[in-house]
Amino acid sequence: MKTLLMIKPDAVKKRIIGKIISILEENGFEITGIKMKRFSREEAEKFYEVHKEKPFFSELIDFITSDSVVGIRIEGEDIVKKIRDFIGETEPKKAREGTIRNLFGESITKNVVHASDTIENAIRELKFFFED
Ligand code: CMP
């Protein structure tokens, strides 16, 4: 099973890409792909299409296109759930201690990382970064 962890522009700006990758490796996660890219508005709107009716949608798109992002493919048993647990709640203040969002997140928008929430979404979202 595979999932996508995406490092967001706030983390890229803070120069903690390496730190996040180290934390993943130190915790035994198997990284099988890494790609940095900058989303166009159209791509970002497609990536986050499930949120398009939400009041925060334009803020989310402005933010995610404000700098590059890093797509990380991670493989393993039950990996979608494991990575979701590992990054913590969407709102960093509510995120469990020691999780990536708890350690580095500033706000619900600047929350460092995104991770696919279902196996189907993982397959869909990985295609934004990787061909296979
Ligand atoms: P993410 O896991 O990338 O999925 C969608 C993103 O929308 C989420 O992380 C947050 O960064 C953002 N988001 C969710 N809820 C809100 C909200 N109430 N206000 C602003 N941004 C939000």
Image (cartoon, grey):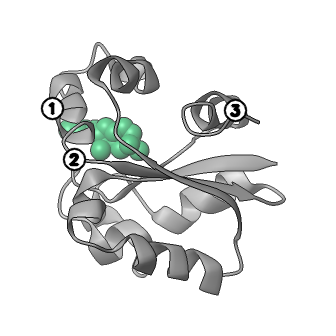
The residue that label 3 is drawn on is 123
| Label 1 C-beta lies within 8 Å of the nearest ligand 1 atom | yes
Among the 4 quarters of the image, the one containing residue 125? top right
Name the one closer to the observer, 119 or 130: 130
Quarter of the displayed picture in which ligand 1 can be seen: top left
Which element is circle 2 on? loop
Q: Residue at x 53, y 82 (%)?
A: 22
Amino acid carrying mark 1 in the image: Glu
- Inter-mark Cα distance, 1 to 3: 25 Å
Estimate how packed mark 1 is, as few (under 14), some (14 to 19) or many (20 or more) residues with alpha carbons within 10 Å: few
The answer to whether the residue labelled 1 contacts the one labelled 3, judged by CB atoms less than 8 Å apart, is no
From the viewer's perspective, is 91 left or right of 129?
Answer: left
Q: Earlier in the sequence, mark 3 or mark 2?
A: 2
Residue 5 screen position, x and y as percent? 54, 53
The residue beneath circle 1 is 59
Q: What crowding class fits label 2: few (fewer than 14 Cα within 10 Å), some (14-19), or many (20 or more)?
A: some
Q: Are marks 2 and 1 in contact (CB under 8 Å)?
A: yes
Residue named by callout 2: 109
Image position, residue 124 (x, y; %): 63, 27
Rendered residue at 24%/29% (across/down): 61
Residue sitting at x 19%, y 28%: 56
